[in-house]
Image (cartoon, rainbow, N blue to C red):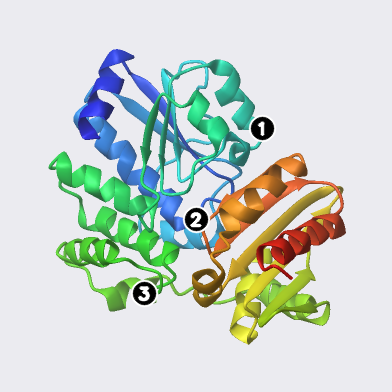
């Protein structure tokens, strides 16, 4: 793959590129982009890359960026760019209004991701650096660094570890390869204990309030032996969905609606996926994202939908899909 990247950069005589991360960029997206920008410079010295976070990074990412700094550009030169890179981003719709810029420019596009990439993205991509078996995008970038014999700094190694820890939920969903890579990152003078402690961000009061409000609006369905939780709240949907799993739900669907714009987070336990094989990203979020004029995608146990319409209609469609899949 490294050879293909080198050929790609040489073929387009790359001098300037823009690396995009999806809106509310999580630590996996942030630090995969950060190290990738340095790696591309290493293998193509004349190249300069700007990192652009669509509508900024997540709150946790901002917290971690105080410990491992990431240089970004809030106003990159789109016209000057020779190519674009989408990191940890499976569809241009995750780039909001900038997605149209990427599509209409017809400039070469590289995709670096561990999600199932949207078919429309595959059509416009010039180079795909995708491994759906990887547990995080940071792992993919680390493997590229190893092949290029690119020595990381201690802080950059910590950044990659942050991304891996976040994406695997503190190694709960880590593979053997994930653990091997994490062990190699520790050789940079890091410890798991310190990395985990560095990622602990005290829960703010608005997030606590969102969880409590959503709990008061909870709707519980029992489909066969599975407990499915639905609720609505204006913000912190992902946090609320995780909280519902901790309360005992097998699958949590939490949405919010503002002026016709819908945001839905879906989370399930690993047991639910293992026994039902319902992939929240492929089986639920992909199709509903398009149906509601937006986008959707994600992992087997973690997915999201952004679109337009009525939230109750989205919930009803999700329930229909689940009933069909579970043969209720």
- Point out which mark residue 97 bears: 1
The residue labelled by disc 2 is: 26
Side (left or right) of 297 relative to 141 = right
Residue wearing tag 3: 196
Mark 3 and mark 1 in contact? Answer it, CB < 8 Å: no
Q: x, y (%) of residue 218?
A: 79, 78
Q: Can the viewer see residue 235 in this picture?
A: no
User: Taking 48 as reference, is 184 above or below it?
Assistant: below
> How far, Cα to Cα, is label 3 from label 1?
35 Å
In this rendering, is residue 128 above or below 258?
Answer: above
- Quarter of the picture containing the C terminus is bottom right
Where, by quadrant of the figure, is residue 135 drawn? bottom left
Numbered disc total: 3
Residue 114: x and y, percent? 41, 49
Depth check: 124 or 109 in front? 124
Q: Secondary structure at mark 3?
A: helix
Q: Residue at x 20, y 52 (%)?
A: 153
């Amino acid at each position: 793959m490294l050879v293909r990247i080198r050929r790609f950069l040489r073929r387009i005589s790359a001098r300037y590129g823009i690396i995009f991360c999806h809106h509310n960029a999580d630590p996996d997206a942030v630090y995969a982009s950060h190290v990738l920008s340095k790696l591309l410079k290493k293998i193509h010295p004349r190249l300069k890359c700007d990192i652009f976070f669509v509508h900024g990074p997540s709150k946790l990412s901002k917290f971690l960026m105080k410990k491992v700094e990431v240089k970004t550009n809030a106003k990159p030169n789109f016209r000057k760019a020779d190519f674009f890179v989408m990191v940890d981003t499976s569809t241009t719709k995750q780039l909001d209004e900038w997605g149209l810029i990427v599509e209409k420019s017809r400039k070469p596009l590289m995709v670096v991701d561990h999600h199932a990439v949207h078919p429309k993205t595959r059509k416009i991509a010039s180079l795909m650096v995708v491994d759906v078996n990887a547990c995080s995008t940071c792992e993919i970038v680390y493997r590229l660094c190893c092949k290029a014999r690119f020595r990381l700094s201690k802080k950059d190694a910590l950044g990659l570890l942050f991304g891996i820890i976040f994406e695997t939920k503190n190694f709960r969903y880590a593979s053997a390869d994930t653990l091997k890579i994490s062990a190699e990152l520790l050789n940079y003078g890091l410890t798991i204990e310190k990395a985990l402690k560095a990622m602990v961000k005290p829960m703010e009061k608005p997030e606590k309030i969102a969880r409590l409000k959503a709990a008061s609006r909870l709707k519980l369905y029992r489909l066969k032996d599975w407990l499915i939780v639905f609720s609505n709240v204006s913000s912190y949907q992902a946090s609320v969905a995780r909280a519902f799993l901790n309360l005992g739900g097998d699958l949590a669907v939490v949405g919010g609606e503002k002026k016709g714009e819908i945001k839905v987070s879906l989370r399930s336990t690993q047991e639910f996926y293992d026994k039902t094989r319902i992939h929240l990203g492929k089986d639920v979020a992909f199709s509903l994202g398009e149906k509601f004029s937006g986008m959707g995608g994600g992992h087997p146990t973690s997915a999201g939908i952004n679109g337009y319409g009525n939230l109750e209609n989205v919930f009803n469609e999700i329930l229909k899909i689940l009933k069909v899949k579970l043969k209720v």
